[in-house]
């Protein structure tokens, strides 16, 4: 469906839904012997090299209900409202976790619960994000595959595991006062690319 407003693609895990917070709460509550590690790697399991710990975390991430029950990241729902107020259409663009059979269904249900039926129906759940049009992709992944051939500019959503990346477009959470400037810059870049 073609939008009349410029589209801002928005990732879910680590941007809207608190994947890390839910995992850490689970470890504290159910496995207090596992220390909470400082997050340095994009994949949570990579910060837990002990095979037993990795297996426990992988089992959690592949379990039914995990994605459905993730809490929203602080300010995320208001952040989507802000994107809309600035004149853009926020559209979800999130990769599925292939090892979780319920992931796609639960991501759509999470969106329905938190943002309504329309956003859930329009959500893109696909790993090939470069195939979707937009002026920006707000994503916590340090480097998005095939970003060089995408229509959008990658806006890094700040997290501890992506701070080593020197990104010229970054927001420090949904309450970042630079959000409007960053999206304006993305729109300008999009128009320049479209003109060539």
Image (tube, rainbow, N blue to C red):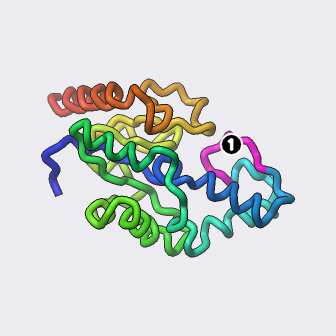
- Residue span colored magenta: 36-44
Residue drawn where x is 26% and y is 43% of the image: 84
Image height check: is 52 above or below 184?
below
Q: Quadrant of residue 87?
A: top left
**Coordinates of residue 109 in the picture (x, y in percent):** 41, 69
Name the spot of residue 182 as percent of width and height, x first: 35, 28
Q: Residue at x 61, y 73 (%)?
A: 63
Please give the count of numbered marks on the rendered protein. Answer: 1
Residue lying farthest to the right in this orientation:
33
Task: Give the dominant element type of the magenta stretch: helix, strand or loop.
Answer: loop
Where is residue 48 drawn, in percent x and y? 76, 52
Residue at left 52%, top 63%? 97
Give left or right: position of 39 versus 95: right
Query: Which quadrant of the figure contains the C terminus?
Result: top left
In the picture provided, is 179 more to the left or to the right than 52? left
Q: Residue at x 44, y 35 (%)?
A: 175
Out of 45 and 82, give the one closest to the viewer. Answer: 82
- The reply to whether the magenta stretch includes residue 38 is yes
Residue named by callout 1: 39
> Would residue 93 appear left or right of 40 to someone viewing this image?
left
- Locate the N terminus by quadrant: bottom left
Above or below residue 13? Residue 163 is above
Residue 59 in percent (x, y) is at: 68, 69
Give the left or right position of residue 1, taking residue 79 as reference.
left
Q: Secondary structure at mark 1?
A: loop
């Amino acid at each position: 469906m073609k939008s009349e407003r410029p589209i801002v693609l928005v990732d879910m895990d680590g941007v809207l839904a608190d994947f890390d917070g839910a995992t850490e709460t689970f470890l504290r509550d159910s496995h207090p012997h596992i220390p909470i590690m400082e997050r340095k790697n994009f994949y949570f399991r990579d910060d837990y090299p002990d095979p037993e710990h990795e297996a426990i975390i992988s089992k959690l991430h592949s379990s039914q209900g995990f994605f459905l029950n993730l809490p929203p990241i602080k300010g995320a729902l208001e952040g989507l409202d802000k994107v809309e107020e600035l004149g853009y259409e926020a559209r979800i663009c999130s990769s599925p976790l292939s090892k979780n059979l319920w992931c796609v269904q639960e991501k759509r249900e999470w969106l329905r619960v938190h943002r309504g039926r329309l956003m859930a129906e329009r959500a893109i759940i696909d790993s090939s994000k470069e195939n979707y049009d937009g002026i920006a992709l707000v994503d916590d992944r340090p480097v998005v595959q095939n970003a060089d051939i995408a229509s959008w500019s990658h806006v890094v959503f700040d997290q501890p595991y992506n701070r080593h990346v020197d990104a010229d477009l970054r927001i420090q959470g949904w309450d970042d006062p630079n959000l409007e400037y960053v999206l304006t810059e993305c729109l300008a870049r999009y128009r320049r690319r479209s003109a060539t």
